[in-house]
Image: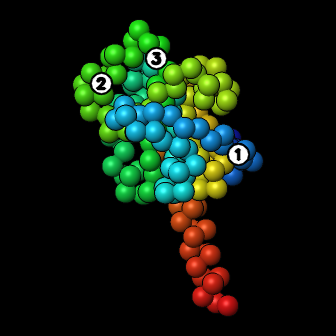
């Protein structure tokens, strides 16, 4: 029994390590208009934050709203760690009018942007929502999470913190390298 538990623990550790260190792919840049009327570009967000969480969602998607609610509890810690959360809305024109009410009712402080023609969703090959990506400081997709059930917010949260910490380590290494020359 102990051996079986030890093996299962090792497999879980290797799986988690693989997810954090999985081969990454370049995130496709986008420019989308926010609920505040301003335009936001992924490249600009990446350059000013240690990590960017990009989440595709819609007002009619109950798991999407549950995910956003659960992550709201952790968002102050993410912000303090240099991470920004971008909620990309996929509602059509008919339901888009509900966005401000949803934002207020749920007290979400995320950067909310619209994907008017679902082009960003297609570029990221999103087939269902919620679908969450974490973009690292190099502009690479370092983590992807599909779907949501209670508890998964912890995986997203921990991966985001690890990716931001890695960005911090890289910046420190660059500074140390310059100092040692």
The N terminus: image quadrant: top right
What residue does disc 3 label? 91
Can you say whether 69 is above or below 23 in the image? above
Can you say whether 58 is above or below 123 in the image? above
Between the C-alphas of marks 3 and 2, the distance is 12 Å
Q: Are marks 3 and 2 in contact (CB under 8 Å)?
A: no
* Spot occupied by residue 106 in the image (x, y as percentages of width and height): 28, 28
Q: What element carries label 2?
A: helix
Give the residue at x 36% y 44%. Answer: 74
Q: Residues within 10 Å of mark 1 (few under 14, many from 20)?
A: few
Closer to us: 156 or 108: 108
Q: Answer left or right for 64 relative to 131.
A: left
Give the residue at x 36% y 45%. Answer: 75
The colour scheme is rainbow
Give the residue at x 39% y 12%. Answer: 95
Label located before the other in sequence (3 or 2): 3
What residue does disc 1 label? 26
Circle count? 3
Task: Tell me where residue 65 sits by quadrant.
Answer: top left
* Spot occupied by residue 169 in the image (x, y as percentages of width and height): 57, 68
Label located before the other in sequence (3 or 1): 1
What residue does disc 2 label? 100
């Amino acid at each position: 029994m102990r051996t079986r538990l030890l093996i299962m623990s090792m497999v879980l550790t290797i799986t988690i390590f693989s997810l954090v260190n999985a081969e990454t792919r370049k995130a496709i840049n986008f420019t989308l208009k926010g609920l505040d009327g301003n335009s936001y570009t992924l490249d600009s967000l990446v350059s000013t934050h240690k990590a960017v969480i990009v989440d595709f969602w819609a007002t009619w998607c109950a798991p999407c709203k549950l995910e956003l609610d659960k992550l709201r509890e952790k968002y102050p810690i993410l912000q303090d760690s240099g991470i920004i959360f971008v909620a990309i809305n996929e509602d059509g024109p008919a339901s888009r009018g509900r966005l401000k009410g949803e934002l207020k009712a749920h007290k979400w402080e995320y950067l909310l942007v619209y994907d008017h023609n679902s082009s960003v969703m297609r570029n990221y090959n999103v087939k269902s929502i919620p679908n969450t990506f974490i973009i690292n400081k190099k502009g690479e997709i370092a983590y992807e999470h599909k779907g949501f059930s209670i508890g998964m917010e912890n995986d997203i949260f921990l991966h985001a913190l690890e990716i931001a910490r890695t960005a911090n380590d890289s910046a420190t290494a660059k500074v140390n390298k310059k100092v040692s020359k």
